[in-house]
């Protein structure tokens, strides 16, 4: 009799212990611990955030930050070994792959805004970029008003084309707006004179110019169509335990001075594979963000 | 799956400021239909001409037909549209190139003509097969009646051939509609393009593409039903496609 009692207690204790563990680890953290692997989603041509180098290995500013997060997750779960799997994503596949658990973090250049937060969560902002336009120096477009009556291209489905449409109406620019499939094709339209200007996040314009045949022919506007908008690394919504670890990891990187170092490595020095130098020193807003990290989707927050 | 389903999204205002997301998709659908219809007309006209050339006894004519069909049939449609839109204006004299680049609605016209010519190669092969399937006696009878070659085609061969190839033409029409989706590569924001734009704005990927799929399915059902009636009305009694 006594023995049966003892077994019962032991069983109950074991069950309780099991439950306590399960409560500690839920969602993404649990699946990382169970499988011993974390999967990062990368972009193939978001220079310098996340792209493939000449060995087809994903590298970039966002990738470096993601590897810091991986280290923090490994420490948090007290794992000896954590395998990092890499999975390519595009702008169309990043949401389904994140939602169905194929990737755990999306390391790229995804804009953090209120509408998108209904679907996914973001960790601390790692970059701020405003919407500007690139044009050929020869076409002498010095301000937004010089675009009047001309053909202007932007990438379909981006916040940039939305801002261009709004400015077109509000300022009576009478611009012929051409939507393009992706950034490379939009830039090609300016290169081949199908459009006089391409409206996009200024940092993406800088990388497109740096990678073009004759970078000296192009100029990025001083005028902007928007306030600086935040980029963030995406993770699944409603997974507070994982978000806490990721937020703490990115905050530590940014406030500890490592963020600045990683930034300088990708934005002010030569980067592989072609040895381009984007030459974009850190701005005051991003410096503020590094000092006091936040995941706010509101552009006004970063002023 | 950790996904926030929201089927009400279609009635929410789209950030482009021109109504709801549903309006956005419907405007894409209208553009898809317009492009497909124009492309199909082009495909029928050019396909007929080339199909006839392929069936003529003249060596030169059949070589021209052969060259045309192989040129358009052997290159992916995506590459063809890209060539028409980005490469052709660079090959022309500078003034003509600039004129072409500044045409209003350039993506629409390029897409309709590009898809039309691509599909015309397929129509041509089918028409040539249709003409080839007719007994030789038909052409000989036409000649015996004193009809010229042109008259023979106009009054005897083509009316028969077209009625025989009606069922495969239906599937070519459906292909034309679906092939217009490739035109997002040159900036034509038709149904697929609008679905992509919707998923970028709202991140509701599955809702956007489900709606696009349903819309493609609906137009294709309309086309299939219409063509079924046409096939029945035009079927030649006693032939494979007739009763």
Image: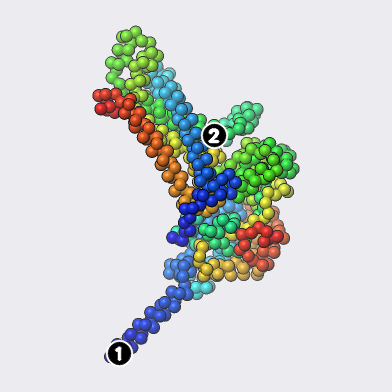
Is residue A167 in view from this perspective?
A: yes
Image quadrant occupied by the C terminus of chain A: bottom right
| Residue A65 % position (x, y) | 59, 63
| Residue B232 % position (x, y) | 31, 28
SS at mark 1?
A: helix
Return the residue at label 1: A3
User: Position of A292 compared to A6: left or right?
Assistant: right
Image quadrant occupied by the N terminus of chain A: bottom left
Q: Residue lying furthest bottom in this view?
A: A2
From mark 1 to mark 2, how far is it between C-alphas? 83 Å
Instruction: Determine whether label 1 and label 2 are within 8 Å by CB.
Output: no
SS at mark 2?
A: helix
Is residue A277 in view from this perspective?
A: no
Q: Relative to B124, does residue A166 appear above or below in the rendering?
A: below
User: Is disc 1 surrounded by few (<14), some (14 to 19) or many (20+) residues within 10 Å?
Assistant: few
User: Is disc 2 surrounded by few (<14), some (14 to 19) or many (20+) residues within 10 Å?
Assistant: many
Q: Relative to B166, does residue A219 appear above or below in the rendering?
A: below
- Please identify the quarter of the rendering in which residue A14 is found: bottom left
Q: Could you tell me which chain the residue with mark 1 belongs to? A: A
Q: In terms of depth relative to the viewer, which is nearer, A286 or A116?
A: A116
Return the residue at label 2: B108
């Amino acid at each position: 009799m006594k023995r049966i009692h003892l077994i019962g207690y032991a069983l109950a204790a074991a069950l309780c212990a099991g439950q306590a563990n399960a409560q500690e680890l839920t969602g993404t953290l649990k699946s990382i611990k169970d499988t011993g692997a974390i999967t990062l989603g990368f972009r193939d041509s978001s220079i310098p955030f996340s792209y493939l180098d000449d060995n087809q290995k994903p590298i970039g500013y966002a990738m470096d930050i993601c590897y810091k997060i991986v280290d923090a997750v490994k420490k948090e779960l007290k794992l000896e070994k954590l395998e990092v799997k890499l999975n390519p994503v595009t702008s169309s596949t990043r949401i389904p792959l994140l939602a169905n658990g194929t990737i755990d973090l999306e390391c790229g250049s995804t804009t953090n805004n209120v509408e998108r937060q209904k679907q996914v969560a973001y960790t601390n902002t790692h970059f701020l970029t405003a919407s500007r336009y690139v044009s050929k120096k020869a076409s002498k477009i010095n301000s937004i008003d010089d675009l009047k009556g001309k053909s202007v291209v932007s990438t379909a489905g981006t916040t940039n084309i939305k801002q261009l449409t709004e400015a077109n109406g509000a300022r009576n620019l009478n611009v012929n707006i051409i939507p393009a499939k992706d950034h490379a094709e939009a830039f090609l339209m300016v290169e081949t004179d199908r459009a006089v200007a391409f409206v996009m996040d200024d940092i993406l314009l800088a990388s497109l110019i740096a990678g073009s045949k004759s970078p000296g022919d192009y100029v990025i506007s001083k005028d902007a169509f928007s306030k600086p908008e935040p980029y963030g690394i995406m993770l699944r919504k409603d997974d507070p335990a994982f978000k806490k670890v990721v937020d703490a990891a990115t905050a530590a990187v940014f406030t500890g001075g490592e963020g600045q170092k990683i930034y300088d490595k990708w934005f002010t020095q030569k980067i592989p594979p072609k040895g381009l130098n984007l030459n974009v020193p850190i701005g005051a807003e991003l410096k503020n963000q590094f000092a006091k990290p936040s995941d706010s989707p509101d552009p006004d927050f970063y002023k | 799956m950790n996904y926030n389903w929201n089927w009400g999204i279609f009635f929410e205002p789209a950030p482009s400021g021109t109504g709801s997301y549903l309006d956005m998709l419907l405007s894409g659908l209208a553009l898809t239909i317009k492009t497909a219809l124009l492309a199909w007309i082009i495909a029928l006209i050019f396909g007929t001409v080339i199909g006839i050339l392929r069936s003529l006894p003249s060596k030169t004519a059949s070589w021209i037909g052969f060259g045309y069909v192989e040129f358009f049939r052997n290159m992916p449609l995506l590459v063809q549209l890209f060539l028409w839109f980005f490469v052709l204006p660079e090959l022309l004299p500078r003034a003509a190139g600039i004129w072409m680049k500044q045409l209003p609605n350039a993506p629409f016209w390029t897409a309709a003509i590009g898809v039309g010519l691509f599909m015309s190669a397929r129509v041509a092969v089918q028409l040539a097969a249709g003409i080839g399937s007719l007994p030789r006696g038909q052409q000989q009878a036409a000649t015996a009646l004193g009809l010229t070659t042109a008259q023979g085609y106009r009054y005897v061969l083509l009316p028969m051939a077209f009625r025989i190839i009606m069922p495969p033409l239906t599937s070519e029409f459906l292909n034309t509609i679906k092939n217009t989706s490739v035109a997002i590569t040159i900036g034509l924001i038709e149904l697929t393009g609008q679905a992509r734009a919707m998923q970028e704005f709202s991140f509701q990927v599955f809702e956007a593409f489900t709606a696009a799929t349903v819309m493609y399915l609906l137009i294709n059902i309309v086309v299939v039903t219409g063509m079924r009636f046409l096939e029945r009305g035009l079927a030649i009694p006693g032939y494979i496609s007739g009763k």
